[in-house]
Amino acid sequence: MTLKKHFLRHTMATVAVISTLSALPAAADTFSGHTFNLTGTATMVGSDLQLTSLEEQSGAAWLTSPLSTSNSFSASFSFSLSALHHNATTGDDLDDMADGITLTLQNLGTSALGQGGGNVGYTNQDSVGSIIQTWDNNRVGLNTNGELFDDKGKPTTKPAPPLTLPDTTLGRAKLITGSQTVSYDASTTLLSMVGTLTVDGQLYDVSDTATIDLSSKFGSSMYLGFTGGTGLGLADQRITSFSIAAVPEPEEWAMMLMGAGMIAYQIKRKRSA
């Protein structure tokens, strides 16, 4: 066998092994009392959901139970993004934190994983999400078109007012912590985000809204989860807590109030008797 043929056979075998590994199913784990499927570089570190820790990584975690697009919901989470300031490949020290995280909605299933780097594991999934981008993008807000860059590589999402960092950027920070609540009103198709960022000790309030009919976009159901990505810059990017609750529709609230009123009336009658 010639050296060239041996090299080709070895290369094809390596590709086959890599393809087999990439086809492995996502691993299920429990985080904050909910079952998530972890894919890519996502893993549990203690009680935290870690999405990335080295350069050139992409990780995601999805609730194993899909959400109905016809129901309103409110999801809250807290996070920690810690700059590692070192490129393990080149050995160079870095001043930038990369690349960010998202809370994402998609309908591709619990093994979905978008592009890494500045795409933060989010793109190529026709996603809707709340974006926190570091590096030099310095953007926080909602995205509804599934893409973070246009065909010329320019950012397409806007910063969420009133986030302004005149003297620094998120990518220059050593530590970013915070929390967000992302809510969807199925009756008005309004998606909203409100939260806080603490950037190296400086507190910022962030908020954004968008109108998007999730039933028209995803069909009857969708998956909620988190994504994160790094490029040559890196960060230890974690979700540290999570909760989700159904939000009653207005008519449900009316029925609940009516029921509570009837119970109160019955209790009053019994006391009078």
Image (spheres, grey):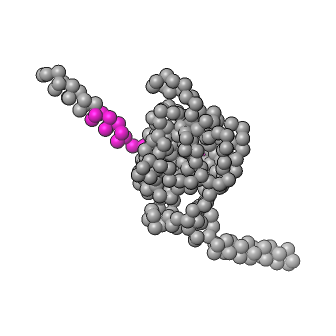
In the image, residue 202 lies in the stretch drawn in magenta:
no
Seen at 17% across and 21% down, the residue is 3
**The residue stretch that appears in magenta:** 15-32
Quadrant holding the C terminus = bottom right
Apparent side of residue 179 relative to residue 49 in the rendered image (left or right): right
Q: Residue at x 55, y 39 (%)?
A: 135
On screen, residue 92 above or below 130: above
Asked if residue 24 lies left or right of residue 210, the reply is left
Nearest the viewer among 220 and 183 is 183
Q: Is residue 249 above or below residue 121?
A: below
Could you say which is closer to the camera, residue 256 or residue 19? 19
Residue 250, given in percent of the width and then of the height, sits at 64, 72
Q: Quadrant of residue 97?
A: top right
In x, y percent, where is residue 220? Answer: 46, 65
User: Is 19 within the magenta?
Assistant: yes
Q: Which x, y percent locates residue 56? A: 45, 35
In the picture, measured across the screen, residue 80 lies left or right of residue 262, that is left
Name the quarter where the N terminus is drawn.
top left
Q: In front here: 188 or 117?
A: 117
Residue at image location 50% in from the left, 27% down from the top: 87
Farthest right residue?
Answer: 272
Q: Position of residue 132 (x, y in %)?
A: 57, 47
* Residue visible at 69% across and 42% down in the picture: 198
Locate residue 173 relative to residue 147 in the image: left or right.
right
Q: Is residue 53 visible?
A: yes
Q: How many marks?
A: 0
Residue 36 visible here = no
